Image (cartoon, rainbow, N blue to C red):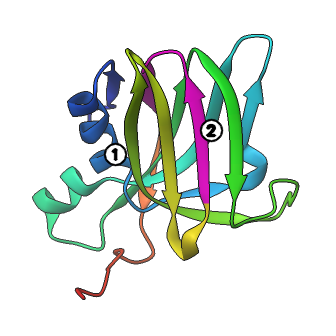
């Protein structure tokens, strides 16, 4: 299995990253903002949708890291950011331009939780960290 290394500098790039991290499991304790570096980072166990299509099995999860640079602010909603044992399911990542290259990156989680990042410009990187294992179940979503 090939490890992914993706970079996003515009909305279309971010849509690709969002598709690859859909249904990732994220521990609240594995997210953080380094104010001095202006970087927001998180570790996740992402469901590898590309591997699932090739195998038609329950699928594979991979350990991955995602970070955003040029972050000026972080606002969380719908979950306790100090909950060391909290677990979230990442559904999507979007970018809304505000002024020139600046804007808001929003990480949306199942159950309505969000992380909103005020960014000077969109700059994100996602990398698999090598670890992979058989998924316990394939994520599914009701079609409303």
Look at the image and tell me whether residue 129 can be seen: no
> Where is residue 114 drawn, in percent x and y?
59, 56
Q: Tell me if residue 134 can be seen.
A: yes
Mark nearer the N terminus (1 vs 2): 1
The residue depicted at 24 percent of the width and 88 percent of the height is 144
Question: What secondary structure is marked by label 1?
Answer: helix
Mark 2 burial class by Cα count in 10 Å: few <14, some 14-19, many 20+: some
For the point 81% across and 62% down, the residue is 80
User: Which residue does the numbered mark 2 point to in the structure image?
Assistant: 42
* Residue sitting at x 86%, y 57%: 84
Task: Identify the residue at the far left of this view.
Answer: 54
Judge whether 56 appears above or below 51 on screen. Answer: below
Q: Please give the label number shown on residue 18.
A: 1
Q: Residues within 10 Å of mark 1 (few under 14, many from 20)?
A: some
**Region in magenta:** 114-128
In the rendered image, the residue lying farthest to the front is: 99
Q: Characterize the magenta stretch by its predominant secondary structure.
A: strand
- In the picture, measured across the screen, residue 90 lies left or right of residue 56, that is right
């Amino acid at each position: 299995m090939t490890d992914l290394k993706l970079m996003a500098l515009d909305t279309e790039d971010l849509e690709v990253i969002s598709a690859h991290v859909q249904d990732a499991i994220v521990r609240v304790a594995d997210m953080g903002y380094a104010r001095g570096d202006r970087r927001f980072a998180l570790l996740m166990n992402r469901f590898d949708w590309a591997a699932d299509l090739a195998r038609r099995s329950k699928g594979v999860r991979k350990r991955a890291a995602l970070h955003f640079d040029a972050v000026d602010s972080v606002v969380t909603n719908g979950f306790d950011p100090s909950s060391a044992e909290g677990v979230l399911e990442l559904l999507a990542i979007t970018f809304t331009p505000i002024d020139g290259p600046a804007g808001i990156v929003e990480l949306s989680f199942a159950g309505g939780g969000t992380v909103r990042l005020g960014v000077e410009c969109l700059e994100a990187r996602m990398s698999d960290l090598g670890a992979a294992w058989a998924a316990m179940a394939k994520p599914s979503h009701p079609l409303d």
